[in-house]
Image (tube, grey):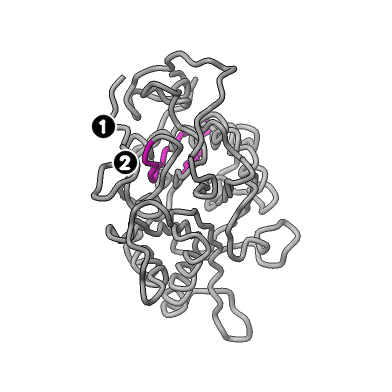
Amino acid sequence: MSAGALRPGARNLITDVPGLLVGNAEDDGLKSGVTVVTAAAPFVAGLHVMGGAPGTRETDLLAPDKTVEQVDALVLSGGSALGLDAASGVADALRAKGRGFDVGGQRVPIVPAAILFDLLNGGDKDWMMNPYNWLGREALEAAAPEFALGSVGAGTGALTATLKGGLGSASLVLPDGATVGALVAVNALGSATIPGSRHFWAAPFEIGDEFGGLGAGAADPTALPPVKGVARTATTIAIVATDAALSQAQATRMAVAAHDGMARALVPSHTPMDGDLVFAASLGTRVSDPLLLGHAASLCLARAIARGVHAARPAPEDVLPCWVEQSD
């Protein structure tokens, strides 16, 4: 459970990165929702995809060779491809506030988004109109430094191979004062816990008892890991952020490093049927070592994944149990 000289920020949330805000909105009957990350001003963002089945919007803009280097918000949503409409709701609401990239006097909000597949989780998906546009607007309006974890926002209907998933977050403060945080909607094809136990794969990186304090447990490294019975119902989507000043290329490298944390916390991860991806955001002026930032991002993401599953709570019509309902 050692993190060396690193310690969590005051909230142990991605919003320990100064200026960052997170909002959640969900529909419990739908068993789905949206999470929005934003700030008072545009911020640098990058992206790295390692899953084989991603669902995204405006992510090509985040390549280091593209013209627009900053975004107004990042969106994580349920709903598979239908959930991409959440970003339209966020963009419309931001434009009404006068936000967006100036093109000849017209404001065009830059709102990259990623989705997870939660259409087979027991919720009522027989809607007349796509609900995600409105959920995106609600999540943006709810954006604040404090937010809930577990069965909320994009994590509302998330599932893993054996347990309900959820929305998780964690942070670390580096010795040089820079802060790194992670936010994740855990909806993995694989498992966050060692088969046959409540012990998390991420346990070696736990700080205190932030996800139960059970320790590492014992696992057979040669055993085949459990996976979802319906293989196409997956994808873990995440955001890592820092108050260190990064270029778009450096932010992309931090996103690459953060994927190590996903692989430490979910077994298996980055499969052909997962759309696993990580956004990276930079808002601040601190100078910090990119190597340490990447390392901290991976630690935060591993912990955030476990925290999201740990915080999930039961709801009517659930198709899988929650971690809190399990016993060794």
* In this view, 56 is above or below 171: below
| Identity of the residue furthest to the front in this view | 229
Residue 315, given in percent of the width and then of the height, sits at 25, 47
* In this view, 129 is above or below 266: below
Quadrant housing the N terminus: top left
Residue at 40% in and 47% down = 158
Q: Of the residues tagged 2 and 1, which is closer to the observer?
A: 1
Residue at 48% in and 40% down = 228
What is the total number of numbered labels drawn onto the structure image?
Answer: 2
Q: Is residue 282 left or right of residue 252?
A: left
Residue 146, given in percent of the width and then of the height, sits at 31, 50
| Identity of the residue furthest to the bottom in this view | 105
What's the amino acid at mark 2? Ala
Quadrant housing the C terminus: top left
What's the amino acid at mark 1? Glu
Residue 101, given in percent of the width and then of the height, sits at 58, 74
Q: Kindly state the secondary structure of the residue where label 2 is placed.
A: loop
The span shown in magenta is 163-182
Which sits in the foreground, 212 or 176? 212
Crowd tier of the residue under label 1, counting other residues whose Cα lies within 10 Å: few below 14, some 14–19, many 20 or above? few
Crowd tier of the residue under label 2, counting other residues whose Cα lies within 10 Å: few below 14, some 14–19, many 20 or above? many
What is the chief secondary structure element of the magenta stretch? Answer: strand
What residue is shown with label 1? 325
Specify the label residue 312 is tagged with. Answer: 2
Distance CA(mark 2)–CA(mark 1): 10 Å
> Residue 173 magenta-drawn?
yes
